Image (cartoon, rainbow, N blue to C red):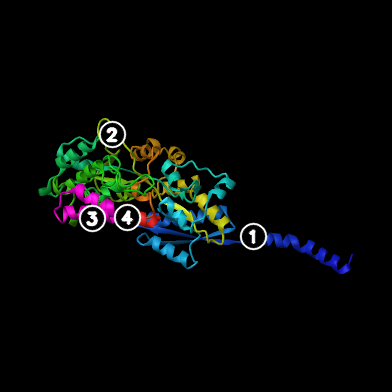
Amino acid sequence: MNKRFLLVLALLALLLPAVLVVAQDEVVTVTWWATERGRDTAATRDMHFTLARTFEESHPNIRVALALYPSRGFATRVLTAIAADEGPDVFYHYFAPDIANQGFLEDLTPYIEASGSSTNWFPNGVARGIYEGHTYAVPRDAAAGFVAYNKDLFDAAGVAYPEDGWTIADFRALANQLTNRDNDIYGVGAIVGGEGCMLWSPFSFNLGGEITSPDGRDVVGYMDSPETVAAMTWCLELVTEDQVTAPAELQDQFGELVFLSGNVAMQSISDWELAAITEQADFNWAVVAPPRYDENTDVVPWTDSYMYYMWNGSRHKDAAWELMNWLSGPEAQRIAAEAGVWTPNGPAVYQELGWDTDPIRSVSYNQLINSERVPNYLRSQYFWDCVYGPLADTRVRWIEGGERDVAGMLAEGAVQAQACLDDNYGG
């Protein structure tokens, strides 16, 4: 054998361990884009950085470059970066599952199967990540809708607190009973009274109507159904006929969480608002499960979650998955929960923290464990382009235009929305 060749082999044998050490010690940087909303507390920002640094401690070969952006316009920022081939490795948002067909998300199914990761998440978080049998997202958190009430206002009016098992008729009766406009006291605050009542409130499914089909592709027969017409009318009448909702000037002052004014007896909220209420409310308050439709029905939970996604153009997919897997796992979930920022994405951490029996948190927990139905606005990627506008027009025409033909307005809106969906889906 050639002596020079043998010499090369000998040198390689000496150098190989050093090469392997360098490879093993290589540090990669994963970009993680996250958001802040107006109602977030300072703890939200701190918690993001705590998560990033804690992950790095147990993953010394991975660095996390965390960037926080305002929530408004965040999706546009992400998609613009992806189009420029500069997208983040990991980000969270609340896309409809069929956004996966646009091709910019990594299919996480192989990573989940290879890692044997626990997917003991609440049903809604699982459903939100699946498209055509593949998983494209994992849940950041889990949020349920319920009703917060001001105990001081109930006590001052001599009215009994709402209890589990109440109905939407009970809610409306209490709202009227507690409203005293002369004293600037209102039975209801924020989104009840329009399309929000039908979409992202605990009333949405408990009013008996639906806006879209389960797959989000059909609105005719749903938005214009007699049940949805009755539900939308109920929401709108709270504003104009009953006049129990907080006025615009109060909502301008306190934003969507007008409950913090102390002048609102009840407001539909979710876990995402609890941190602000806990930190800022200067009155006694409590929460109760959503009202059901009537005595013959059960409560249908409204639940939601932000989802973690991986850009399929990531240069560090294995490291990005390590971050996503950890963020959606029990250690990160405990950190966020104990910081009072997010609620856990599965029952195990709830139970570990004793939240499944807590007077406040158990109300959410009992909704989340039964969270089978995906909200209407999360069923189709084209909901905001096609469906939301025609639905919101009904509110505008009712409140500002004085129109009262809800059936006609929703029928007109359903036709318009359906044409848009059909065009986008190529049908």
Q: Residue furthest top?
A: 296
Q: Badges 1 and 2: C-beta atoms under 8 Å apart?
A: no
State yes or no: residue 389 in magenta: yes
**Residue 425 place in picture, x, y as percent:** 40, 55
**Residue 74 place in picture, x, y as percent:** 39, 61
> Amino acid under label 4?
Ala
* Observer-nearest of 19 and 316: 316
- Residue 164, numbered label: 2
Q: Residues within 10 Å of mark 2 (few under 14, many from 20)?
A: few
> Amino acid under label 2?
Asp
What is the C-alpha distance between the residues marked 2 and 3?
34 Å
What is the C-alpha distance between the residues marked 4 and 1?
56 Å
Q: Which residue bears the numbered disc 1?
A: 25
* Observer-nearest of 321 and 351: 321
Q: Residues within 10 Å of mark 4 (few under 14, many from 20)?
A: some
Residue under the point 15% across and 47% down: 185
**Residue 63 place in picture, x, y as percent:** 54, 60
Q: Residue furthest left?
A: 182
- Residue 419, numbered label: 4
